[in-house]
Amino acid sequence: MHNTSENGRRRARFLATVAAVVLASLGATAVAFGITSQDPAPPSAPAGQTAGSRPESPSPATDTKQSEESPRPKRPDDSRPAKESVLDELVYSRPVAIDIPKLGVTSSLVDLGLDDEGVMETPQVADKAGWFTPSPPPGIPGATVISGHVTYNEPAVFFKLGDLRSGDRVEVEREDGVTTLFDVYRIGTFPKEGFPTKAVYSQPPKSELRLITCGGLYDAANNRYLSNVIVWAKLVGAEKA
């Protein structure tokens, strides 16, 4: 009982720390690298829950969430020869690249840790996303967190993240050569003061993916975005060529 309680406290402290550093990091990134005009503007996901409006139970009118009973739409690439499935054989291996076919996004991943001030580091180039290394790698139980810039003096790697919808595929390649396959089941745009911390950083019993960037309205006077675009996705497969 003592160990269980202590583990619970440690987990709660970890989640609080992660939420704080990611929010601070994304806010700082928007201020430092926002563009001064919105031409074109990044696409917006459905509006997310605001603070105090049941962020864990999104309204269908404001947040896209796919029913677990709904069949996954057939994709054009479903007819490709099947690769070897290794879903039940996964061990710890860091992610090295992300591919989002619908958006035409392919990026190698940089490691994002904590800087000297305890804030999550951010990618230093526009075209690369980053894996937050305190989160588990894909294929391991828990939520893998990957973030990227929406703009970086120009449209950046996650500029089109708001175009994703339920059923879209996200692929994350691991260092061991395994490609983990995730299907989006929820996406929303959330004001920074209403960030759904628990829904994003709670650790599920199976592998899931969280993609985070800035978005929503752009405050030109303060050179920052007012919201975050967040994507939730569940592991549906793992392949090795």
Image: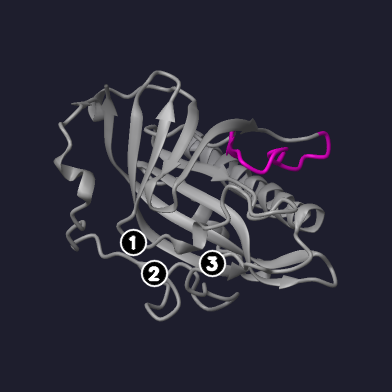
Q: Magenta stretch mostly in which secondary structure? A: loop
Magenta range is: 116-133
- Give the quarter of the figure containing the C terminus: top left
Furthest residue to the bottom? Answer: 61
Disc number placed over residue 221 in the picture, else none: none
Residue 162 within the segment the image draws in magenta: no
110 over 37 or under it: above or below: above
For image coordinates 50% across by 63% down, the residue present is: 162
Q: Are marks 2 and 1 in contact (CB under 8 Å)?
A: yes
**Residue named by callout 3:** 43
Residue 126 within the segment the image draws in magenta: yes
Q: Position of residue 171 (x, y in %)?
A: 38, 39
Residue 205 visible, this angle: yes
Q: Nearer the viewer, residue 80 or 88?
A: 80
Q: Mark 3 packing: few (<14 Cα in 10 Å), some, or many (20+)?
A: some
- Give the quarter of the figure containing the N terminus: top left
Please give the count of numbered marks on the rendered protein.
3
216 over 61 or under it: above or below: above
Q: Mark 1 packing: few (<14 Cα in 10 Å), some, or many (20+)?
A: some
Q: Which amino acid, by three-letter code, is at mark 2?
A: Thr
For image coordinates 48% across by 32% down, the residue present is: 97
Report, in whole angstroms, how far the alpha carbon at label 2 lies from the one at label 3. 15 Å
Q: Earlier in the sequence, mark 2 or mark 1?
A: 2
**Residue named by callout 1:** 166
Q: Position of residue 33 (x, y in %)?
A: 77, 53
